[in-house]
Amino acid sequence: MHEIEPYHRWQDNYNSTEDQLSPFFGRTYDEFYYSQKIYNYFIHPQWDNFGSATLYMKILYTDYENGYAVFEMLGEWNDCLHNDVMFLKRDVVDEIMQHGINKFVLLAENVLNFHASDDCYYEEWYEDVNDGAGWVCLLNLLPHVEEEMKDAHLDHFIHFGGPLSNINWRGMSPNNFLKAVEGLMAMQRRLA
């Protein structure tokens, strides 16, 4: 687990530690001291803790002009025991929504498990972004995580699965990536 680093090739375009509007503004990282863990396994020190005991993230890109934020997630998404979505919504999403962000892309290929609880925070997030014609989508979920989220009926509030399941995003620039996701989201809205 310690070898899984947050994606770094977009850092010339955006760095959350240098963005005064980011909840992670001013954070510093020790590249040699590993202190954060998931399942008793150390993780790379570049991952950001947002209050969850088992889920970490990195804001890879934020476009305030167009209302986009891209998060990369790592770990176990556990709403049942740790209410991870509450921490994500209150301590990260609500903070950046104040600055016009209403489209959220969560890169979830490193979300290892999902454990559901109630869907109140997902519903709230859905209502918050829909007021401004926004959305929330999860990309590249592992098949069993996607199934667990479907079983919890989270697809009523966030978009995942289908064409959002296998996006090769790493070779794209942030702007091209967001255009591709916007196209997929427009297609999903037409089909709904």
Image: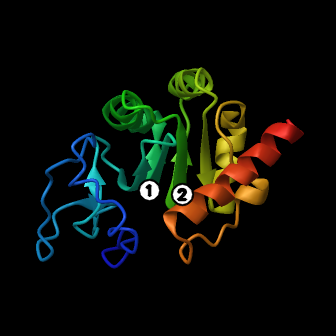
Circle 1 sits in a helix, a strand or a loop, which is it? strand
Q: Position of residue 4 (x, y in %)?
A: 38, 74
Q: Quadrant of the C terminus?
A: top right
Graded by Cα atoms within 10 Å as few (under 14), some (14 to 19) or many (20 or more), the crowding at tag 2 reads: many
Task: Give the residue type at disc 1.
Answer: Met
Nearest to the observer: residue 20 or residue 91: 20
Give me the residue at 26% from left, 41% from top: 23
| 18 relative to 131, above or below | below
Circle 2 sits in a helix, a strand or a loop, which is it? strand
| 87 relative to 35, above or below | above
Q: Position of residue 156 (x, y in %)?
A: 71, 31
Give me the residue at 79% from left, 38% from top: 189
Nearest to the observer: residue 18 or residue 5: 18
Please indicate whether residue 112 sits to the left or right of residue 144 in the image: left
Please indicate whether residue 62 sits to the left or right of residue 16 in the image: right
Give me the residue at 56% from left, 28% from top: 129
**Label 2 sits on residue:** 108
* Label 2 close to label 1 by CB (< 8 Å): yes
Q: Position of residue 72 (x, y in %)?
A: 44, 58
Q: Quadrant of residue 64?
A: top left
Task: Give the residue type at disc 2.
Answer: Ala
**Label 1 sits on residue:** 73
Q: Position of residue 182 (x, y in %)?
A: 67, 50
Which residue sits furthest front? Answer: 65
The structure's colour scheme is: rainbow
